[in-house]
Image: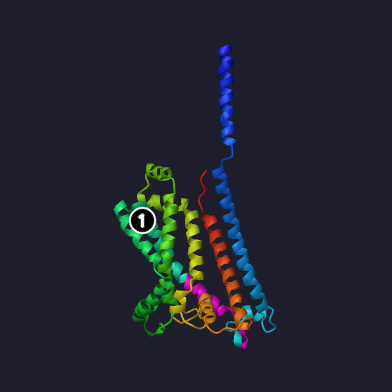
């Protein structure tokens, strides 16, 4: 009896020590938690500071008596120096080039990610992955001249003289090539993170490798693929050098991708690179464009998140 009581006390003492060990605060973990908290606060502070500075200067633009919301959202010509404030000529060209870019990068990026994750051998992965990473490391100005000097002549040979020297189509196509490694890499990581048990369960039910990849693995990784889509859209909308070199250097309200038109980022780069006096209407208009660019990116990201959450598979 005494031995049993002694054993119980020893077990209680050991469990109490284990409990205390789990509750004990470790210096390394506390330091890491503190650094992560600081990083999160800095990210939020940076975002708020950017929005504040852009909004402050944009407020000066909209406070100008010549500028009205009716002119800003209701007209299509953008020349602030002569009182024309129609933002849609810049917004439509931005959306068209971004749409063309995503039309190229999303299907090709998903296809390459599926191949690398589900079909490629180790040797094929060791060859193809570095090639995609090289594409990600090419400067965007090089992509711009590639679009102007290589892609545009090909489009002119195919479609004829309707293709202008500077056009949105070539810029959008090359932007898609530029974004391709980003979407492919992020999507492959999401596909590789899908539990092996889901694949084995599908094989046990008689599914082929293709059916498993499309109907099981892809829906399970939709959350990560959605993140890749959002990052890709943000990258396309915010791209500057490719559209500045290849798309054109003047606002033009058109839905024809073969015509020259200036995007929001291209216009900001061109105007800010010249002699621009502080506090003039041209100067403050750049911040109004930047604020509009921020809102367009935000709306596109929210729409993408809504679509992804609508079709995402959830597993208990």
Residue 55 in sight from this viewpoint: yes
Q: Nearer the viewer, residue 307 or 1?
A: 1
The image shows residue 53 at horizontal and vertical percentages of 63, 70
* Residue 85 shows in the view: no
Outermost residue toward the front? Answer: 27
Q: Badge 1: how crowded within 10 Å, few (<14), some, or many (20+)?
A: some
- Which residue shows up at 38% across the image and 59% down it? 111
Question: Where does residue 197 sit, x and y in percent of width and height?
Answer: 42, 42
* Residue at position x 36%, y 81% in the image: 156
Give the magenta-colored segment's residue range. Answer: 82-98
Q: Camera-side residue: 249 or 108?
A: 249
What residue is disc 1 on? 115
Classify the position of the N terminus by image quarter: top right
Q: Can residue 79 be found in the magenta stretch?
A: no
How are the colours assigned in the image?
Answer: rainbow
Extreme residue toward the top, this view: 1
Q: Quadrant of residue 170?
A: bottom left
Percent coordinates x, y for residue 187 in the rendering: 44, 57
Whether residue 96 is in magenta: the answer is: yes
Identity of the residue drawn at 29% across and 53% down: 123
Out of 313 and 6, give the one closest to the viewer: 6
Spot occupied by residue 142 in the image (x, y as percentages of width and height): 39, 74
Q: Residue at x 51, y 45 (%)?
A: 315
Instruction: Judge left or right: residue 276 versus residue 204.
Output: right
Q: Secondary structure at mark 1?
A: helix
């Amino acid at each position: 009896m005494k031995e049993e009581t002694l054993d119980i006390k020893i077990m209680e003492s050991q469990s109490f020590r284990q409990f205390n060990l789990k509750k004990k605060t470790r210096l390394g973990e506390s330091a890491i938690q503190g650094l992560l908290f600081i990083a999160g606060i800095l990210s939020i502070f940076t975002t708020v500071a950017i929005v504040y500075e852009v909004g402050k200067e944009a407020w000066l633009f909209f406070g100008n008596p010549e500028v009205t919301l009716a002119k800003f959202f209701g007209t299509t010509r953008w020349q602030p120096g002569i009182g024309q404030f129609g933002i849609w000529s810049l917004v439509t060209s931005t959306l068209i080039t971004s749409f063309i870019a995503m039309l190229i990068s999303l299907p090709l990026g998903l296809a390459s990610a599926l191949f690398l994750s589900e079909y490629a051998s180790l040797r094929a992965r060791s060859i193809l992955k570095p090639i995609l990473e090289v594409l990600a490391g090419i400067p965007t100005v090089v992509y711009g001249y590639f679009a102007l000097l290589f892609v545009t002549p090909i489009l002119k040979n195919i479609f004829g003289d309707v293709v202008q020297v500077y056009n949105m189509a070539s810029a959008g196509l090359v932007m898609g090539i530029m974004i391709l490694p980003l979407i492919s890499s992020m999507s492959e990581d999401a596909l590789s993170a899908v539990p092996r048990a889901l694949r084995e369960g599908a094989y046990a039910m008689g599914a082929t490798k293709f059916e498993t990849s499309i109907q099981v693995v892809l829906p399970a990784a939709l959350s990560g693929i959605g993140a890749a889509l959002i990052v890709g859209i943000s990258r396309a909308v915010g791209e500057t050098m490719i559209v500045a070199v290849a798309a054109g250097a003047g606002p033009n309200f058109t839905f024809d991708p073969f015509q020259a038109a200036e995007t929001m980022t291209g216009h900001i780069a061109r105007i800010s690179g010249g002699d621009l006096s502080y506090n003039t209407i041209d100067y403050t208009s750049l911040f109004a464009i930047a604020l509009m660019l921020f809102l367009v990116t935000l709306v596109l990201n929210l729409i993408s998140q809504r679509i992804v959450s609508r079709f995402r598979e959830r597993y208990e």
